[in-house]
Amino acid sequence: MASVKKRPDGKWRARYRDPAGKEHARHFDRKVDAERWLAGVETAKARGEWVDPARARITVDEWSQRWAGTLGQLKHTTRARYAGLLRRHVLPRWGRTPLAAVSHADVATWVTDLSAEGLSASTVRQTYRVLSLMLDLAVKDNRVVRNPAKGVRLPPARIPDKLFLDHRQVEAFAAACGERDSLVIYALAYTGLRWGELAALRVRRVNLLRRRLDVAEAVTEVEGHLVFDTPKSHQCRSVPLPRFLADALGRHIVGKAPDDRVFTAPGGGVLRNNNVFDRAAVAAGLPGLTPHELRHTAASLAVAAGANVKAVQRMLGHASAAMTLDVYAGLFADDLDALADRLDQAASDSRGSTETPVIRADGVRTAADQVRTGRDRKAVRTRRTGTKKPA
């Protein structure tokens, strides 16, 4: 039973029993403060929101170690990125803070401070996400009632400009890379593979008869070590090959074993993203070009060739068509013009002529067109009933 009593030293002692029957107490200078605190506790118990205060005394540093132990389902690169953000930005500010002492206002101030330190909007957002994910787990583990990081305003994410090469630019860039690396450029620009997917591609994944690449593996460098894993979306996919690229790949893999990698470094190891791109980009008049922009190029060339959003999604391995539209919505703008032309042609075909109905600016059909429409409807009714209006 909850109660408030005055102690001999003048303090007010508020006590209550938790749902498990364990007694908890807290002392206040004023009776009114004790009563308010106790009322809040009873309300939380009634709503099922009560948490044991002792469980929230764990520090963010201690809790981060438990949280890290729940990330086994994530890719190595993601876990490594989270660990780096924790070490550099989260723990220096929050490491010694108990979970119960993390407040919404303090998190908002911290986010502002990160931006003031010169961190990019993307890094600030990722760092905030790490703290918020830890607090989400604390809520689920019944250590805090709610996530105090929820609703904090973040710096707007800057969408970088994308560079799309045309066919001639791809050819010029491939030529600048030299004979050995030109096929790598063509493969990236016409399939949309990520660099790690291309570097991990094995001969048995190349189907020359169907002109397909089966993307089932990717390689990344994590803390100086190469890690082979599933692709970014954890989903295997089949990527179409243009005939010229399939023929070139067929010549390239002659004599290779099924488990050999299609593309390798000069010494035979895993293909690395070295500075050949920088030199070749400058030579081709494309300074600053990165391998990932060849993935954007593949999407652009596919759309220009008539691919719809679903086909582009499957080729690139995006989780959903919505994600593809978020990234490449501008590439599909020309489809709207083509759609309008097809609708116009369909409307003309349905009337059996190329005559276009005249519509006033206010959207009302002209009298002449209404007469034509009425005449057409009467003709339809006559054909259906087989009767004619008497002369």
Image: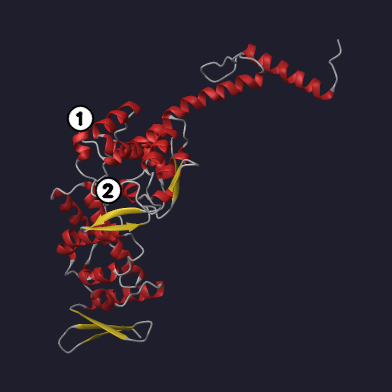
> Which residue does the image show at 38% across and 54% down from the upper left?
259
Q: Is residue 350 left or right of residue 102?
A: right
Is residue 138 something that shows in the picture? yes
Residue 271: which disc?
2
Q: Is residue 136 left or right of residue 93?
A: right
Residue 283: which disc?
1
Q: Is residue 377 left or right of residue 387?
A: left
Judged from this view, the residue extending furthest toward the bottom is 8
Residue 206: which disc?
none
Seen in the picture, residue 85 relative to 265 is either above or below; the reply is below
Q: Amino acid at mark 2?
A: Leu
Q: Amino acid at mark 1?
A: Ala
Rendered image quadrant of residue 331:
top left
Q: Nearer the viewer, residue 298 or 135?
A: 298
Label 2 or label 1, whichever lies nearer to me, is: 2
Task: Give the crowd class for mark 2: few <14, some 14-19, many >=20 residues within 10 Å.
Answer: some
Q: Nearer the viewer, residue 317 or 218?
A: 218
Q: Position of residue 387 (x, y in %)?
A: 85, 19
> Which residue does the image show at 28% across and 71% down from the upper left?
66
> Which residue does the image show at 35% across and 76% down from the upper left?
42
Mark 2 or mark 1: whose residue is earlier in sequence: 2
